[in-house]
Image (cartoon, rainbow, N blue to C red):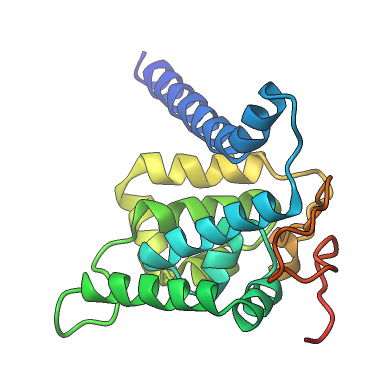
Amino acid sequence: MMVDEREDSARQLADWADGMLDQLGAQEELDGDLLAAMGRSPSLSEETLARMAEAVRAAALGLGPDGCALAAGIPERLLQHWQLRNPSFAAAMACASTLAQSQIPDGTDKPSHPSPAALRVILKAIRAGARHTVAAAVAGVPLKTLNGLRRKRPEVDALILAARRARPKRADRRGVSAYEHGYRLVRVDDTFSQTPSHLQSDTPSSP
């Protein structure tokens, strides 16, 4: 009976973790679903601003440049390109990072515990095919801290395993490119003058 109870508990935990990953995926598609409900597709300016907002939010929650890029669903080089081309966005990122630093206790350079935003980035990276070491580094979480959290909290371990199960069949597990997403847009308008015209590719040309 004890073995059956443990197996049942493990199945329930795995089902919960799979459900959480589904919720995270659904949230990423929410803006698109809302636009579709209004009979519209995203314009270049709307898509760009939405991704910029996600990057700023991630910076305010203490993530570094690579974590902010992943949170926004864009390559880090595109994030850097936006900051070079758009001073307002660069200033917003800098202010958000300063805000995050102001919340860290004196005498330390990192938060004492990983944030939900960091865990979300880790799960997103692993789900896309990144190794645990890469995913933890992108989120700014030491691998030792992540492994310790997995041992202490079965829920975190279940989420990590669920992210691995949710990987695409052909996910590239060789490095950062595994979780960089192409930047594809469906309608271009010319109302956002600060946005380079070549952003339909995930490889911007030199400014």
Vertically, is 32 above or below 196?
above
Vertically, is 72 above or below 25?
below
* Picture coordinates of residue 185, whole percent (x, y): 80, 50
Residue sitting at x 66%, y 49%: 46
In the picture as drawn, the residue positioned furthest to the front comes out as 191
Q: On the rendered image, what quadrant is the C terminus found in?
A: bottom right
Viewed as shown, does residue 150 lie left or right of 106? right
Residue sitting at x 59%, y 44%: 163
Residue sitting at x 27%, y 62%: 113
Viewed as shown, does residue 68 lie left or right of 188? left
Q: On the rendered image, what quadrant is the N terminus found in?
A: top left
In the picture as drawn, the residue positioned furthest to the left comes out as 106
Whether residue 200 can be seen here:
yes
Residue closer to the observer: 133 or 30 = 30
Viewed as shown, does residue 45 lie left or right of 111? right
Residue closer to the observer: 114 or 35 = 35
* Picture coordinates of residue 155, whole percent (x, y): 38, 39
Whether residue 133 can be seen here:
no
Residue closer to the observer: 119 or 38 = 38
Residue sitting at x 55%, y 80%: 87
* Picture coordinates of residue 171, whole percent (x, y): 78, 53
Residue closer to the observer: 43 or 10 = 43
* Picture coordinates of residue 16, whole percent (x, y): 46, 27
Vertically, is 174 above or below 28?
below
